[in-house]
Structures are given as structure tokens and as C-alpha cells.
Image (cartoon, grey):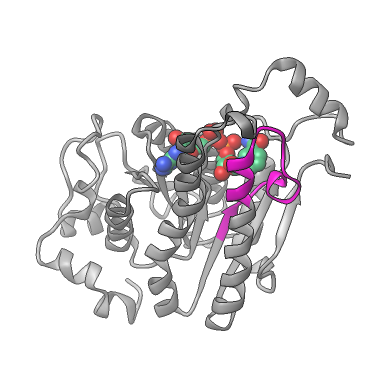
Amino acid sequence: MQDGLSSNCHIVRRNEKGQNPLQCNRARDSVQTAGPTRKNMHQNGNGLNGNGLNGNGLHGNGLNGNGHGRLPGKVAIITGGGQGIGRATAVKFAKEGAKVAVCDINMTSVAATLAEVRNNGGDALGFQVDVTDKASIARMVEGVMFAWQRIDTLVNNAGIVQDARFSKMTDEQFERVIDVNLKGVYNCTKAVVDIMLQQNSGCILNASSIVGIYGNFGQTNYAATKFGVIGMVKTWARELGSKGIRANAICPGFIETPILDSVPEKVLRSIEEKVPMGRLGKPEEIANTYAWLASDEASYINGAVIEVSGGVTL
Ligand code: NAD
């Protein structure tokens, strides 16, 4: 337990009264069965052992908690962790020694990510979180604090596309993408910032896009959100830098994940031809950048907007 934080954090105090935050998001979780008590959480390390949504019970003998890796003992929350870049990031963070909270609106995909983390000897908890729903975010933060008593890194990765050329774009398409990609980043960061301020440390990593810098055909809504994320990152870097909290954004190019499923094969091939490296990116190449930014190796990087695109914008 971290000194200072656990003693005055209402999240932990509420749990001492017997509430069980890790049951909060279980309503639609068909995999999980029994909830933990505070006592067995500490005995088991994560309190969800034996039900398929837990970490791996390998505390101390996996890659975590043994001082190895770039992120030893750090606690990370990854939104949209169920697939694509989020899943690769969860696995990478765990391999680097972090404890990982995998959050996604899709609980089946969360279970799959947890299994992959577990197979790599990592330590993770899963939460059903809709980043547009502040109550589900609060329950997740409460659960993370209950289990691990700190939050070192938030990766605001969850994102969607609903493309249409501007003349055809509906208000619903515009507003939904704003709600998830922009307000979702605001909601999640708002939910952890006081904890990071109490710790005098933290790292807020955010998924922007090259589309946020250059725009893209059919992506008025998406471009607005990704440009907006950069604005928030630069503001947080200014406001929070003196408090030990760094905020940075990554602008991926075209990365092979399910988000590209709706893009016709022919278009993908033409994109590849425009990339000087001659290929699309891999989710692991974004995950590696997040892990480096979250590590102490990036201790002076704040307010940066880092393009990871194979040079497609050159
Ligand atoms: P993806 O579609 O494979 O994964 C996105 C994840 O977010 C999914 O697991 C999904 O269930 C989850 N999600 C969606 N709405 C949610 C909500 N309301 N609450 C919680 N979770 C939600 O996408 P990806 O390619 O892995 O993209 C990850 C991030 O990177 C996104 O923000 C995306 O905009 C950004 N990005 C991706 C690319 C790319 O080419 N793949 C390029 C630039 C930026």
C-alpha cells in the first residue's frame, strides 16, 4: 500500500466499510463469478482469481513486481484495451512490469486481452467501462485504487470512427465520435487527475492521429476529436507539468487493427504505397511508444505530439 494515498483516499475508505468496487462493473460480465473481499484481494493480489477475468496469480514470479522491465510496479489504466492498439499496449505494459487495468465497453474482448496478458506472465484486472459514462469510469478507478492504491499511467486509447463526407455526415455521427474520442478522454483524465496530483506523479498518454494534424476525407468528426486531444494534451502539459504529471499524445498513421476493417483493401494498398516504409504499422509499434513514454526514460517529455506513421505524412 502506498503511504499517504491510501490513508486519506475516500476510495479506499469506502471499501473499508465493506463495499466491493470490483463487483461494480460486473452486471454484464458473464465470466466473473464471486467477488473478492478486501482480505482475499490482498492475499490473492487481485481478488478475482479463479474466474477468468483476473490477473494470473503470478505476483512475484511473473514479470511483475520483480524489478524487471521499463515499468516495474507501475499501475496503468488502458481504455479500449480489448483489441487493437489497446490490447497490444496492455500486453506490452505487463511485459515491462506494470500492473494493468484493461478497460473496454466490450467485456468479451477484455477477457481475451486478460488471457493474453496472463499468458505473458502479467498482472491485470478487467473492467467494463464506457468512456462516455462517468459512473462506469468512477467504478473502475475505485476498483484500481482498491487493488493497487495508485495510478501511474492513464492511456486514453478508446476511440471510434463513423466516417462520412461532410455533406452527408449526420449530427448523430458527429456527436457520437465527439462523445467517445474527445469527451471520453476528458472524462477519464478528470477521473484520475486528483489521484495523480496527490501522488505528485503521473503520466497521461493519449491517442491522437495524423488525421488530427492533417485532416482526412470523410472524417470531419474524427479529425475534430483528434485535433482536440492535442489541444487538451498541450494544456495539461502546461497546467500539470509542475506537479510531476506529464501529458503526451501519439499520432499513429495507418495501423493494422480492426478499426481499419471498413477500409477497402484497394485503399489500404494505395496507403501502403504512400508510406516510405512500404507497409502499414503494427499495433505493437504504437504500444512500444506508449510504454517508452510511460517509463522513466521519457521523464522530460511533456506536451509532445509524436507521430508514429512510418513517415506517411512526408
Ligand atoms: P480498435 O477499433 O481496434 O479498438 C478500439 C477499442 O476501443 C475497441 O476495443 C472498442 O471496443 C473500444 N471502445 C470503443 N468505444 C468505446 C467506449 N465508448 N468506451 C470504452 N471503449 C470503447 O481501434 P485501434 O485501431 O486499436 O485504435 C485505438 C486508438 O488509436 C483509437 O483512439 C484510434 O482513433 C487511434 N488511432 C488508430 C489508428 C489506426 O490506424 N488503427 C490510427 C490513428 C489513431
Q: Would residue 207 be seen by someone viewing this image from the given angle? A: yes
- Residue 257 sits in which quadrant? top right
Quadrant location of the C terminus in the rendered image: top right
Question: Farthest residue in the front direction?
Answer: 167
The percent coordinates of residue 7 (x first, y second) are 25, 79
Q: Residue at x 79, y 21 (%)?
A: 269
Q: Out of 14 and 135, give the one closest to the viewer.
A: 135
Q: Residue furthest left?
A: 17
* Drawn side of residue 105 relative to residue 43, left or right: right
* Start-end of magenta stretch: 205-226
Closer to the camera in the image, 139 or 178: 178
**Magenta span includes 210:** yes
Q: Is residue 145 left or right of residue 203?
A: left
**Which part of the image, by quadrant, shows the N terminus?**
bottom left
Front in this rendered view, residue 21 or 69: 21
Percent across and percent down for residue 130 are 36, 44
Identified at 58% across, 30% down, the residue is: 259
Q: Is residue 291 left or right of residue 12?
A: right
Q: Is residue 233 magenta?
A: no
Q: Residue at x 16, y 55 (%)?
A: 20
Q: Position of residue 62 (x, y in %)?
A: 46, 48
**Number of marks:** 0
Q: Classify 96 as above or below 222.
A: below
Q: Residue 77, how many percent across, how many down?
A: 44, 54
Residue 82 is at least partly visible in this image = no
In which quarter of the view is residue 228 placed?
bottom right
